[in-house]
Image (tube, helix red, strand yellow):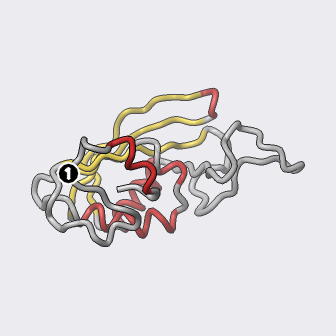
Amino acid sequence: MDVCESAFKCIDGKVNQTFLHPGDDLPSDHFDIVYSFLVTQHMPEDDILLQFPNVIRSLKRETGRFFVQFAGSTVKDENNIKIRDTCVDERGVNTEGIPPGIQRMVRTKEYAKKLTRDCGGTVIRVAGDKDFAQFKSYWYYLAVKRV
């Protein structure tokens, strides 16, 4: 699943089927594994609340797992903001090298777990702490199953 059809060119011939955002057409009780990497730190909360329930619903009830990577911030008071503009200072200068239109949406582990629960998932593992000092952030992932 992606938000942009052009992204499918990278996987052409390597997958059986693709789905465009928001994923209403995802089959229920179907996938063993769904993997999301380098995505949620660019998604406003409303998009997560729209997409995650469909992804979680698409997991096989007993054995399906959703592995989703999140980013948190080491900058005071930057985590858990519902929507945020691209990182710009008071002069409008992009201070973090993030391309225009891309958002830096960082969340604490506890907040990411709450979002996931709100979308019908149960977090069974939190792991993978990786510090990225140059981005003032850390990355981690959640392993999620259906409720």
Q: Which residue is drawn at 30% across and 67% down?
A: 54
Going by the picture, which residue comes out furthest to the right?
Answer: 91
User: Residue 70 at x, y = what percent?
Assistant: 45, 45
Residue at image coords 57%, 52%: 105
**Horizontal relation, residue 2 to residue 101: left or right:** left
Residue 53, position as x, y percentages in the image: 32, 67
Q: How crowded is mark 1: few (under 14 residues within 10 Å), some or many (20 or more)?
A: few
At which x and y percent is residue 100?
A: 69, 49
Q: The disc labelled 1 sits on which kind of residue?
A: Asn
In this view, the residue in front, 12 or 136, is 12
Numbered label tally: 1
Q: Nearer the viewer, residue 122 or 27?
A: 27
Question: Toward the viewer: 39 or 62?
Answer: 39
Q: Which residue lies furthest to the bottom in this view?
A: 24
Q: Residue furthest left?
A: 62
- Counting from the top left corner in percent of width and height, residue 142 is at 34, 46
Horizontal arrangement in the rendering, residue 82 relative to residue 90 (left or right): left
Along the line of sight, which residue is nearer the eye, 40 or 143? 40
Displayed quadrant of residue 80: bottom right
Q: In the rendered image, which quarter contains the N terminus?
A: bottom left
Residue bearing the label numbered 1: 16
Q: Is residue 130 above or below residue 73?
A: above
Q: In which quarter of the image is residue 29?
A: bottom left
Q: Which residue is drawn at 40% across and 43% down?
A: 69
Q: Tell me the quadrant of the picture where the C terminus can be found.
A: bottom left
**Secondary element at tag 1:** loop
Name which quarter of the figure residue 116 lies in: bottom left
